[in-house]
């Protein structure tokens, strides 16, 4: 498999991280190694990089791409919710930048065996890490109708969640759900092609299942906390998110960590003792320009947020 993934918001993320020679960086989502390569080039001759990915195939691809940097790069096949453990073990504490480029790569998307896309027929797997216990098929064939509807609503913001869940339960009684095409066709039957919608009717269902299978939202929250602890003063936290549920978590995290007191407004005195640990570098989000979106449609929904650590790590 070749590295055919185009890194999103590449220049923007390099400058948001203020990559410089001798710096130490963590890339929590190596993917095809595009951002990691940029970090290693711009931190030459002595910058160091720790890279993580939950997907063993991504590690293989990134390792081949980054081989020329030798000992300057350490790559670990691990989920980023274990970031602290990995970073402490390898001495990556007090680092200059931590990058998250969330979601999945084009390499993963086009790999039919993963079942991440309704565009290619494959098994309903959706795990980024094959060591995870549950596939999308397991969830689809075992959750109750109410649980399925809840999952589609919470993680896909799918307005037709109840109709889809009902049809899933009806269909699986005849034969278990097994393939991406089968699921995509079922969703289309349940909600129809929505008039005026730009996205395929199954987009939200696939997003919801992928988030549930990989525990994406809770793991992102856990990893952001750990990333902040690992940053040196002045170190940058850079996150590229691809859907509003992720982006909301990142936005809220950066807002809260940039605040002093976080007591409810009606509290007469502060009881939280919360101290700001981040400074927002730019208030809003950075989005790809029209040229990038035209060249790489996957970039369309990307949102980059950046913040700086403002207290000495200890
Ligand atoms: C968008 S791709 C990264 C592309 C990369 N920045 C590049 O330029 O080639 C996202 C990667 O993050 C990985 N990933 C997603 N969630 C993860 C998690 N919780 N822990 C570790 N890796 C994760 C995926 O397996 C995928 O390879």
Image (cartoon, rainbow, N blue to C red):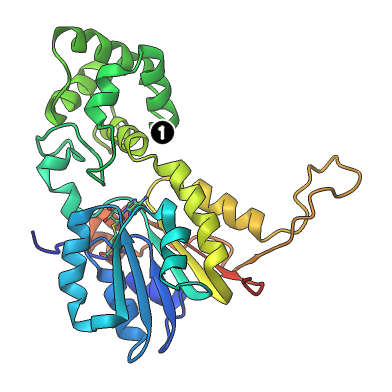
Q: Where is residue 28 in the image (x, y as percent from the top left)?
A: 37, 61
**Figure quadrant of the C terminus:** bottom right
Indicate the quadrant where residue 189 lies: top left
Q: Residue at x 23, y 60 (%)?
A: 296
Q: Does the residue labelled 1 lie within 8 Å of ligand 1?
A: no
Rendered location of residue 5, percent (x, y): 19, 61
Q: Element type at marker 1?
A: helix
Q: Please tell me which residue is depicted at 56% across the width and 75% down the height of the picture.
A: 232
In the image, is residue 114 above or below residue 9? above
Which residue is more in the foreground, 65 or 109? 65
| Residue 222 image position (x, y, % from top left) | 50, 49
Instruction: Name the quadrant where ligand 1 sits.
Output: bottom left
Residue at image x 30%, y 63%?
Answer: 76
Residue furthest toward the right?
Answer: 268
Q: How many marks?
A: 1
Q: Which of 40 and 287 is in front in this view?
A: 40
Q: Can residue 5 be seen in this view?
A: no
The correct choice, above or below, for 243 with respect to 255 in the image is above
Q: How crowded is mark 1: few (under 14 residues within 10 Å), some or many (20 or more)?
A: many
Q: Position of residue 14 (x, y in %)?
A: 39, 76
Task: Provide the residue designation for mark 1.
Answer: 155
| Up-down relation of residue 192 to residue 60 (above or below) | above
Quadrant of res 233: bottom right
- Horizontally, residue 63 falls left or right of residue 302, namely left
Residue drawn at x 44%, y 83% as measured from the top left? 23
Instruction: Decide if residue 126 is on the left or right side of residue 52.
Output: left
Q: Is residue 278 visible?
A: yes
């Amino acid at each position: 498999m070749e590295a055919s993934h185009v890194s999103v918001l590449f220049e923007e993320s390099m400058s948001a991280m203020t990559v410089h020679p001798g710096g130490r960086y963590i890339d929590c989502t190596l993917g095809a190694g595009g951002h990691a390569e940029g970090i290693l080039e711009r931190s030459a001759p002595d910058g160091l990089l720790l890279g993580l990915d939950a997907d063993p195939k991504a590690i293989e691809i990134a390792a081949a791409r980054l081989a020329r940097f030798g000992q300057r790069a350490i790559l670990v096949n691990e989920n980023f919710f274990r970031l602290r453990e990995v970073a402490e073990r390898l001495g990556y504490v007090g680092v200059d930048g931590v990058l998250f480029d969330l979601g999945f790569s084009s390499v993963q998307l086009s790999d039919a065996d993963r079942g991440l896309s309704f565009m290619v027929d494959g098994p309903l797997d959706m795990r980024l890490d094959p060591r995870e216990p549950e596939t999308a098929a397991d969830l689809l064939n075992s959750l109750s109708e109410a649980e399925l509807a809840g999952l589609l609503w919470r993680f896909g913001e799918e307005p037709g969640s109840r109709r889809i869940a009902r049809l899933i339960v009806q269909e699986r009684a005849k034969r278990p759900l097994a393939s991406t095409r089968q699921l995509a066709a079922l969703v289309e039957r349940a909600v129809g092609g929505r008039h005026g919608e730009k996205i395929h009717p199954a987009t939200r269902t696939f997003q919801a299942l992928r988030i549930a299978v990989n525990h994406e939202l809770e793991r992102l929250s856990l990893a952001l906390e750990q990333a902040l602890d690992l940053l040196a003063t002045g170190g940058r936290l850079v996150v590229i998110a691809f859907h509003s549920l992720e982006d909301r978590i990142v936005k809220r995290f950066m807002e809260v960590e940039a605040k002093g007191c976080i007591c409810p407004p009606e509290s007469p005195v502060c009881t939280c003792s919360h101290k700001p640990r981040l400074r927002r570098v730019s208030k809003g989000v950075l989005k790809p320009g029209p040229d990038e979106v035209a060249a790489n449609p996957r970039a369309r929904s990307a949102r980059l947020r950046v913040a700086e650590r403002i207290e000495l790590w200890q």
